Image (tube, rainbow, N blue to C red):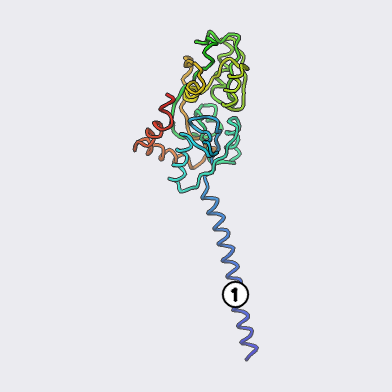
Amino acid sequence: MKNFMFQALMIVFMISILAACGSEGEDTSSSQEQEEKGTLKMATSADFPPFESYDTEGNFEGFDIEIAQIIAEELGYELEIEDMNFDGLVGALQAERVDMVMAGMSATEDRSKNVDFSTEYHRSGEMLISKAEAGIDSLEDLEGKIVGVQLGTIQEEGADLLSEEYGFEVKKVDDASILIQELNSNRIDVGYMDKTVATGYMDSQGFVGFDDPTTSSPGMGVAFPKGSDLVEKVNGILEELKANGTMDELKDKWLSDYE
């Protein structure tokens, strides 16, 4: 009898241990799954104020950053931002290392072959800037000059085309801040960039500039890997931000001094 009771107790004990182990495994798996689902990974190129840059404490800030934070909050995710060179952003999406990109990226037809875009949330245009003493006021003044652009941008494509007609050299750099350094150091004569960003540098650095009259660039969109189910969800959030006035408030906060 004692032997039978002992065996019964041992069976109950072993079942309890196995149940506990199974429960612990399920909790761990569930926790990991929740952690993965709880993070929205976004890539940007944080050299593009007022859209994305760093504040004095090293935190991301800007128009795109605030929109991204709202998107993540509305979707119930924690936003994780990775800073990288602009020309590596599309590749990061194709490799699905990140869930989306916000980097003042124009939703061009060429890019749309490799990534999906949200609806447009901002449109700037292009501008050419230079030092005031350079006397560059039109495309015709660019002949024989060196025009700097950022790699991977719509301005890189535009400059390559314009150079054939207006006879200037195109110099390509990794980010917008280097472009400004090149301009200040006289290693380039002109910087060709997004109009909103260019206006900010004109105010802070004393440059002068003029709009590119030859292009009408597509607006900026949030970029996703092809087939991402986030596109429709984010489109809904962007529409709501436009409808309830939040988008206008963010533009007033971040872009009004640049337009």
Residue 86 in percent (x, y) is at 58, 31
Residue drawn 59% across and 66% down?
A: 22
Residue 146 in percent (x, y) is at 60, 14
The foreground one among 218 and 168 is: 168
Residue drawn 60% across and 16% down?
A: 188
Q: Is residue 10 above or below residue 238?
A: below
Q: Is residue 236 left or right of residue 173?
A: left
Q: Residue furthest right?
A: 3
- Three-letter amino acid code at the position of disc 1: Ile
For residue 257, what is the image quadrant? top left
Q: Residue furthest bottom?
A: 1
Mark 1 = which residue? 15
For residue 163, what is the image quadrant? top right
Q: Is residue 59 above or below residue 4?
A: above
Q: Is residue 239 left or right of residue 169?
A: left
Residue 117 in percent (x, y) is at 49, 34
Provide the secondary structure element on which disc 1 rests.
helix
